[in-house]
Image (cartoon, grey):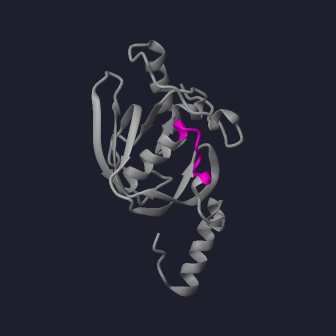
């Protein structure tokens, strides 16, 4: 079932989530189905349970097919994943800035620093351990979604608010800059 996505300003998005204790609860299976249905309906790259008002440590992200996401056309493929009770471990201090958007902050983008490489661990709905080392866009997506579990929205991580605004204005700004200077953006 497609559920309403909470928007920035809703206090529920700012509260830390609780660990999942019962992997066999029927409500968990329903939650996962709803997360995927809602993410796909909104063309999202990922979605966290708190974004649909459920304060549990569950995120979904990626796609079954290596296809382009309309919101992130230049991103690499991220496998379809359900991650429960995640733990993230940066593998270096190296960070890179990249443009992010969020289904809870519709129509806006910001330049957000994230760890370039990390390891994430957790379990899938069957209790099977997940342990992956990832980088680049995959690492960015996981960090973004797991931030929601701690009550953090991406605008809270932006270093320079001049790099935060409405998507169409920022895209127009980048396009104008490219056309006037003929210099490619590095990010």
Asked whether the viewer can see residue 68, the reply is: no
Residue 149 in percent (x, y) is at: 52, 36
Q: Would you place residue 161 above or below residue 121 in this image?
A: below
**In the image, residue 54 lies in the stretch drawn in magenta:** no
| 157 sits to left or right of 76 | right
Q: Would you place residue 97 above or below residue 128 in this image?
A: below
Residue at the image position 46 percent from the left and 19 percent from the top: 28
**In the image, residue 150 lies in the stretch drawn in magenta:** yes
| 79 sits to left or right of 154 | left
Q: Nearer the viewer, residue 83 or 105?
A: 83
Residue at the image position 49 percent from the left and 16 percent from the top: 27
Q: Would you place residue 7 above or below residue 4 in this image?
A: below
Asked whether the viewer can see residue 79, the reply is: yes
| Corner quadrant of residue 74 | bottom left
| Corner quadrant of residue 94 | bottom left
| Corner quadrant of residue 79 | top left
Residue at the image position 29 percent from the left and 34 percent from the top: 130
Residue 10 in percent (x, y) is at: 70, 37
Residue at the image position 50 percent from the left and 38 percent from the top: 47
Residue 176 in percent (x, y) is at: 60, 78
User: Magenta stretch?
Assistant: 148-156
Residue 72 in percent (x, y) is at: 47, 55
Going by the picture, which residue comes out furthest to the front? 93
Number of numbered discs visible in the structure rendering: 0
């Amino acid at each position: 079932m497609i559920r309403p996505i909470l928007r920035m300003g809703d206090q529920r998005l700012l509260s830390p989530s609780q660990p999942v204790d019962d992997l066999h609860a029927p409500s968990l299976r329903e939650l996962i189905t709803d997360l995927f249905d809602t993410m796909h309906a909104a063309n999202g790259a990922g979605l966290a349970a708190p974004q649909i008002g459920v304060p549990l440590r569950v995120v979904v992200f990626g796609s079954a097919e290596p296809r382009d996401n309309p919101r992130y056309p230049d991103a690499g493929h991220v496998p379809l994943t359900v991650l429960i009770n995640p733990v993230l471990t940066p593998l270096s201090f190296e960070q890179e800035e990249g443009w992010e958007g969020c289904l809870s902050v519709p129509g806006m983008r910001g330049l957000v620093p994230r760890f370039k490489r990390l390891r994430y661990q957790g379990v899938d709905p069957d209790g099977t351990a997940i342990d992956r080392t990832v980088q680049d866009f995959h690492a960015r997506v996981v960090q973004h979604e797991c931030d929601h579990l701690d009550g953090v929205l991406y605008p809270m991580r932006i270093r320079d608010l001049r790099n935060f605004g409405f998507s169409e204005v920022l895209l127009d700004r980048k396009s104008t800059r490219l056309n006037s200077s003929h210099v490619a953006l590095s990010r």
